[in-house]
Structure formats: structure tokens, C-alpha cells
Image (cartoon, rainbow, N blue to C red):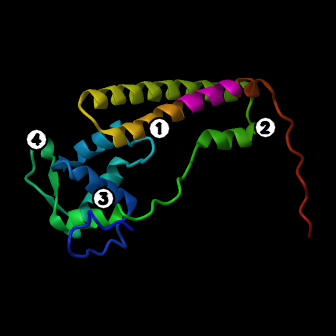
């Protein structure tokens, strides 16, 4: 494990989860309200690192209780900015050195396709068309975010994340095109096999 960028002093991060660590990561760029953090997450990592509003605020509270972030004065609309503490900086520095875990894919359309014999061809076609539209919108968002990032300066690692998003959505659109005819056919209902007693 590379130790070069670790600050001196040890902080126990055994209970620091990925969401907490990502919030600490965003706070390296300066104080942010929960709302601002959610906006930043959704514009870059959002599709691959989903954080709901309630989850973000709950985790910020936990981080504050652990002394990893400090809450500032409430501003307009009662929004409270959070800033990274030195303890939070150390905790993040240790966490980022850890090996990332495996990706987790939860794609509900795949479940619908797997059990597709219970859907009419018309309904399945509607699901596929809806997915196609969503993917086209996301692809446009990633391209826009990448253009914005590139115009603001060099961020090759962040650019790589956005490039992943672009390639992912392009691959999804190709796959949806490939399976377009799948919706036209009604597969036979699988015969139920009686249980042995």
C-alpha cells in the first residue's frame, strides 16, 4: 500500500463506508451544503455511485458526530455548509488507499427480461423504449458534463470517469437495439415442475 500521501497520525476508518468517504472526498474542494454535495455527485458520479438526499444528510450527521466534518453557519433556506476537519482529511487519506470492492449492478430491466414470459410483447416493448429514452438523455448529460469539465481545465481522472459513463450508455443503447426484436415474441410459459416430496 502506498504511504506517500498519508498524513501523519492514525484515524480508525474501519467503520467509514463508501458514501461517507465520497462525501469527504467532495469536501476536499471546500465547504459544501448537503444540497451542493448532491448536485456535484449527480453531475459526475451519480449514475455509478447513487446517494439519495436522505442518505447524504444522514451520513453528514454521522460524519459530524465522528468529528470528520464541521457544520458551519446556516445560510439561505436553512442550508448548512459542511467543511472537512483534519481528522476527516486523515480518514479519507486512509480510506482512499484501500482496494475498491467489486461493482454492484442492479438493473431492474434485466429482471423483467428474465421473467419476460409474464409480460405481453407490447408492455415489454414499452419498457425497452422507455429505457432507450433514459439512456439517450444520460448520454447527452455525460457528454455535456465532459465538455464542461474539459473547458474548465485538466482533470484526466475525472474525465476518465465521465468517459466510462459515455461508453456505458453507448453500449446500453447498442444492446437495446440488438434486443429490439425480443419484445415482439411471446416466449412460452415455463412448465412448472412439481416439487419432490
Q: Residues within 10 Å of mark 3 (few under 14, many from 20)?
A: few
Q: CA distance from mark 1 to mark 3?
A: 29 Å
Residue 58 shows which numbered tag? 3
Residue 117 shows which numbered tag? 2
Q: Which badge, 4 or 1, is on the more N-terminal residue?
A: 4
Q: Which badge, 4 or 3, is on the more N-terminal residue?
A: 3
**Residue sitting at x 36%, y 57%:** 19
Q: CA distance from mark 4 to mark 1?
A: 36 Å
Mark 1 or mark 2, whichever is nearer to me: 1
- Residue 39 horizontal side relative to residue 130, left or right: left
Residue 76 shows which numbered tag? 4
Residue designated by label 1:
164
Mark 1 or mark 3, whichever is nearer to me: 1
Q: Which residues are magenta?
A: 170-178
Q: Quick one: quadrant of the C terminus?
A: bottom right
Q: CA distance from mark 1 to mark 2?
A: 33 Å
Mark 4 or mark 1, whichever is nearer to me: 1
* Towards the viewer: 26 or 70: 26
**Residue sitting at x 26%, y 57%:** 24
Residue 129 shows which numbered tag? none
Labels 1 & 2 near each other (Cβ < 8 A): no
Q: Residues within 10 Å of mark 2 (few under 14, many from 20)?
A: some
Q: CA distance from mark 4 to mark 3?
A: 20 Å
Amino acid at each position: 500500500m502506498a504511504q506517500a500521501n498519508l498524513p501523519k497520525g492514525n484515524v480508525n476508518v474501519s467503520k467509514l463506508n463508501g458514501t461517507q468517504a465520497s462525501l469527504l472526498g467532495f469536501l476536499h474542494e471546500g465547504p459544501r451544503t448537503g444540497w451542493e454535495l448532491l448536485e456535484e455527485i449527480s453531475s459526475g458520479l451519480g449514475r455509478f455511485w447513487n446517494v439519495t438526499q436522505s442518505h447524504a444528510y444522514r451520513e453528514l450527521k454521522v460524519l459530524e458526530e465522528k468529528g470528520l466534518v464541521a457544520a458551519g453557519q446556516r445560510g439561505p433556506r436553512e442550508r448548512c455548509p459542511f467543511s472537512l476537519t483534519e481528522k476527516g482529511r486523515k480518514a479519507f487519506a486512509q480510506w482512499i488507499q484501500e482496494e475498491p470492492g467489486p461493482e454492484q449492478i442492479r438493473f431492474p430491466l434485466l429482471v423483467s427480461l428474465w421473467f419476460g414470459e409474464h409480460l405481453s410483447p407490447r408492455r415489454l416493448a414499452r419498457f425497452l423504449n422507455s429505457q432507450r429514452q433514459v439512456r439517450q438523455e444520460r448520454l447527452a448529460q455525460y457528454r455535456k458534463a465532459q465538455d464542461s469539465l474539459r473547458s474548465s481545465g485538466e482533470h484526466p481522472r475525472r474525465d476518465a470517469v465521465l468517459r466510462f459513463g459515455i461508453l456505458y450508455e453507448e453500449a446500453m443503447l447498442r444492446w437495446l437495439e440488438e434486443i429490439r426484436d425480443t419484445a415482439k415474441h411471446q416466449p412460452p410459459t415455463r412448465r412448472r415442475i412439481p416439487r419432490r416430496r
